[in-house]
Each structure stands twice: as C-alpha cells, then as structure tokens.
Image (cartoon, rainbow, N blue to C red):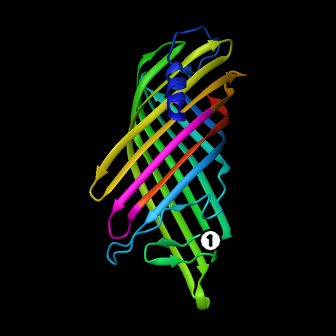
Amino acid sequence: MNKSVLLIAAAAAAVGTPQVASAETTSDQAWLDLGAFAAHIDSDLRLSNPNLGIPGTRVDFESDLGLDSSRVMPKVSAGVRFLRRFRLEGDFFQLSRSGHLPLKGTLVIDDTVFPINVDVHSKFKTNIYRVALGYSFVRNDNVELGVAVGAHITDAAFRIRGEGPLGITLEEHRSKSAPLPNVGLYGSTGLGGNFSLVGNVDAFKMKYGKYKGQLFDAQAAVQYRFATHFGGGLGVRYAYYKVSGHASDWHGVLRYDYFGPLAYLELAF
C-alpha cells in the first residue's frame, strides 16, 4: 500500500465513530501550531530550450547534485472559526538545501551543458504556503467533518554553478511561483481522555494556459491537550507537487514530494 493510500485512510479515520473526550479541538475558536516536519525528499527537474531545439536532461537533485534526501523543516499553521461552521486556516513550511560534488554524467539545463566530472555547486529552496476556507457540515463536541477550498502557493528557486573547460563559468538559475488551487476534506474525532485524531487531505489537478500543475497533500496526527489552552501532536505528512510549463521562460517539469513524521505544540482558545 502506498503512502497516499495510507494517509487517506488515516485522515478518513479522523471522522469515524465519535468517542467521548474531555478536551476536544472542535470547541477551539482559534489555534496556532509551531513544530517541525522531518521529511524524506525526492525531487527532480527537467528544463529544455525549445528555441534552440535543445532537450533538457532530467536532473535528480538528490543523486545527481548531492542535495540532502532528508531534512527537518519548520512548520507553522494557524486557524480561526467563525459563524460556527466556517473556518479559515493557513500553513507554511520551508525547505532549503545546497550541494557540492563532481558530476557523474553530463547534464543539460536550458542551453547550458555541464560536462561530466565538473564540480558544481547547487542550491534549491522552496517556500510552501497553504490557505483554505472550510465549511464543517458536521460539528459537535466530539466530531468535526468538513470540506475546504483554497490554494497551495509554492515559491521555488534553484541555482547550479560550475567551472567548465578553459575556466568558463557555467550557471543556470530559475525562480518560479506556482499557485495551485485545491479542494479537500478535513476532520477530527475524540479518542478518549484528552486525545483526539485529526486529519486533512487536499488534492487538485489543473491546466492553465501554458502551464499544468497537480498536487496531493495529506496529513494525520494524534493530538493531546495537556492544559486548557495548550496541547501538542505527533503525526505524519505526505505532499506531492508537479508543475510543468511550455512557456519561453519555463519549458520543462519540476517535481518533488515529501514524506515523514511531524511534531508540533499548539496554543488554542
């Protein structure tokens, strides 16, 4: 069973059979979570130059450029409820990696050729923002279930630089902001005592002009409320993003996914 199926099942379990809980997140009107996401990362890029008829090489950031395949990322999320059944929430996490190694093979990026054995310095940074407006069609003291619409906004930037034959500097860099709308489900249920299970799933696939994008983002966590306004949670998250374009400034594909455990502390009112 793959990661996405497991997470969908876990998130769906969050809206299962109600159980009594002495402290339940469905009663919170506002919350702020601060934590970390320990992710395993898989990312790659292909960037071509159609004007010159140069097909780009698929570049694996981890194996080809030596970027870390695992990293602990900061994670921040917040939300507020209004008109009883509505909620507005947002998330942010950031990943920044750099690498340095001699190339094991020739890489072609846009109109630049990086020959084998050339020492390259590379950097890849992403900021991911999520905003969503939700409506809870089920909400009581123990259970919440709702639908949400919103967007994932990804700011991605990479730079690859090396010294080629005859001391010629070889460099390619790009930055791109990709807003991807999404629809999703969220829910929570009490597990007894001060424990609860929470989860959400967002997904979307779209084509707009010369660009296409798809995303899948799911997480599930067990929360514990150890005081009236303070709690914490442990869970797991999986996120997949793919953006492709056929424009003059971006003719290629950027893809990456993250999977791993997360932990956070929560302040709620």
Q: Residue furthest left?
A: 209
Q: Which residue is mark 1?
A: 103
Please tell me in which quadrant of the rendered image residue 231 appears.
Answer: top right
Q: Position of residue 85 (x, y in %)?
A: 42, 22
- Relative placement, left or right, of 120 versus 187 is right
Residue 29, can we see it?
A: no
Within-10-Å neighbours for mark 1: few <14, some 14–19, many 20+: some
State whether residue 63 is above or below residue 215: below
Provide residue 62's location: percent of width, then percent of height.
61, 58
Nearer to me, 166 or 141: 166
Quick one: SS at disc 1? loop
Note whether residue 69 is visible.
yes
Give the side of residue 15 with respect to residue 252, left or right. Answer: right
**Range of the magenta residues?**
236-252
Who is closer to the viewer here, 97 or 6? 6
- Relative to residue 268, is residue 140 depicted above or below? above
Give the quarter of the figure containing the C terminus.
top right
Locate residue 81, reporting x and y percent.
Answer: 48, 28
Q: Does the magenta portion include 235?
A: no
The residue at the point 68 percent across, 70 percent down is 101
Q: Is residue 238 magenta?
A: yes
In which quarter of the view is residue 87 placed?
Answer: top left
Q: Main secondary structure of the magenta part?
A: strand
| Amino acid at pointer 1 | Leu
